Amino acid sequence: MTKQLEKVLYTAHTHTTGGREGNGQSSDGALDVKLSTPGSGKPGTNPEQLFGVGYSACFIGAMQIAGAAMQIKVPADTAVDASVSLGRTDNDSAYGLAVTLAVSLPGLERTQAQQLIERAHQTCPYSHATRGNIEVTIALA
């Protein structure tokens, strides 16, 4: 069952032309990117790279919110390295994604860092969107 938003906090508006060999812009002008197919060597980024950056940024935000609730100070130099893989699914007739997030929380005790990651994974909107849909692995780096 699809969960509906009770209160919209923000809506991003974008316009894309040309698919993987096109361009994408946000309505506010903050984003204007040339797109290219992964591995093509052509100038531009691809949707998998954009998804990795978006998920990473959102996950750090979720850790900051979780940290405040858990009274854990999230280090200023917290980082997430995302690997977004594009491939064929089991039946080979469709494409799918898999994501690995390597989370770096310098200076935090390992048990505390793991608790923070687990809580953030429960509240991050990207984690909600992917849960049960694609393989997501989150590891403490």
Image (cartoon, rainbow, N blue to C red):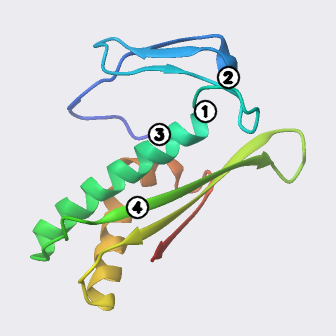
- Pointer 3: what residue? 2
| Side (left or right) of 73 relative to 89 | left
- Secondary structure type for disc 1: loop
Q: Nearer the viewer, mark 4 or mark 3?
A: 4
Q: Earlier in the sequence, mark 2 or mark 1?
A: 2
Q: Are marks 4 and 3 in contact (CB under 8 Å)?
A: no
Could you give the CA–CA distance between mark 2 and mark 3, rounded to whole angstroms? 28 Å
- Pointer 2: what residue? 20
Q: Nearer the viewer, mark 2 or mark 3?
A: 2
Could you give the CA–CA distance between mark 3 and mark 1, rounded to whole angstroms? 28 Å
For label 1, the crowd category at 10 Å Cα-Cα, with few meaning under 14, some 14 to 19 and many 20 or more, is some
- Pointer 4: what residue? 80
| Amino acid type of the residue tagged 1 in the rendering | Asn
- Pointer 1: what residue? 46
For label 4, the crowd category at 10 Å Cα-Cα, with few meaning under 14, some 14 to 19 and many 20 or more, is many
Q: Earlier in the sequence, mark 3 or mark 1?
A: 3
